[in-house]
Image: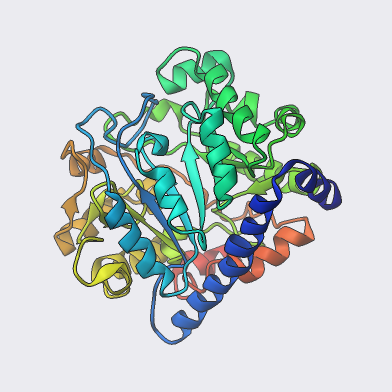
Amino acid sequence: MLPALAFRTLRTADKKCLLKFAWNFGWKGMRSVQLFKKRLKQGDYFPPFLYLSILNSCNLRCQGCWVDVEAPRESMDLATLNRTINDAKAHGNSFFGILGGEPFMHPELLDLIAAHPDCYFQIFTNGQLITEKTAERLRQLGNATPLISIEGREIVSDQRRGKPEVFQRTLRGLDHCLKAGLLTGVATSLCQTNIDDLLTEDWLNELIKRGVHYAWYHTYRPVGPKMSPELALRPEQLVRIRKFVVEVRAKLPIAMIDAYYDDRGQALCPMSTGVSHHVSPKGEIEPCPIIQFACENVRDERGVFETLRSSAFLADFRRVSAQATRGCVVLERPDLVRDLVKRHGARDTTIRGTAMAELEAMEPRMSQYLPGDEIPEKHWMYRFAKKYWFNDFGAYQNSDSSKSSKN
């Protein structure tokens, strides 16, 4: 698997893109995680990765979307984005996830990427606005990877994304990226309507044949104003996903990303472990993208480093959620999220202003934490990488959930 993946990537990806990936994301990313671990030992804190939603607008209307895509546009201006990234860079960070809405609707997205050649950006996009010219510009910059969302084939894509001809338009943007030699990934939010079509080796082999370098399966989370709970997966389906990912990682020449398990197959939450937090289009610093409450903003005079390391709200959120579960606290314990928000007087960061009502309407459901169904990594590369650079970082060592997962 690994030699075939390396050969395919070297043959299809632009050399500048590969070098930027290896240095800005690989070497510097590992260094930022090591710095994160060092800070934790010293009782200090700053996450090694930040996710920035740069605007709320989108050209699609997806089922269950929690972003205010139909509201008047809110976006972070280039000066705010540069100040935030520069502050994080000064303290060891080099990797940033760029989200929306649809990031390519932001008029200064490429200017942002160009302003930080020493960083690496993963752009979460539906791919429909990526033209040949845009893809070529990204190739010239070399320090960004488009992660293109595909939610189903023709019929399901139109249902999930709320517009016609979504699948073909997304594939067109995907092909522009691959033709330009960009390191390119495909992400899928697995739910009841697409799991049987897209959680298959046939689908991954199609992506491989097309030239895609990595895939990321995550699970649909019913939150927001239109939760669509009928799309949520059952516990046995969550186990099925984990088992599939572990198997194909050791088998197919495509990199497989996940953010919810360690090397032993134990569940984790990136927010609870402290490895990342989220910044909204209004600059609000949230625990994660689906928890739309905040006490601080990146525009605060202290800057993002001092703000994040001293935030009582975020620290309490990490502690309480890690004590409650190794999974998603929003899905499993919306009551705890509500209590934390009220305790700290956190503000609703949505434009619609209904986040608390949505939280109170949620019914608890299972997430990735399923004690007794842990599936360890099979491939040595993933096992090694997760053991040292993506695990729970001790967040659960004093929690009941951690103890129960070992019994």
Answer yes or no: is residue 188 visible.
no
Report the residue at 40% width, 39% height from top: 103
Q: Quadrant of residue 107?
A: top left
Taking depth in this image into account, of 200 and 87 the one nearest to the observer is 87
Task: Work out whether residue 205 can be spotted.
Answer: yes
Question: What is the tally of numbered marks visible in this picture?
Answer: 0
Image height of 259 relative to 162, above or below = below
Please state which of residues 314 and 373 is positioned toward the viewer in this rendering: 314
Quadrant occupied by the C terminus: bottom right
Instruction: Please identify the quarter of the rendering in which residue 155 is found.
Output: top right
Q: x%, y% of residue 230? A: 42, 26
Q: Where is residue 311 shown, x and y percent of the image?
A: 26, 70
Q: Residue at x 37, y 30 (%)?
A: 64
- Residue 292, percent from left and from top: 27, 48
Q: Residue at x 29, y 74 (%)?
A: 306
- 357 relative position to 124: left or right: left
Q: Residue 100, percent across and down? A: 37, 40
Q: Residue at x 25, y 27 (%)?
A: 70
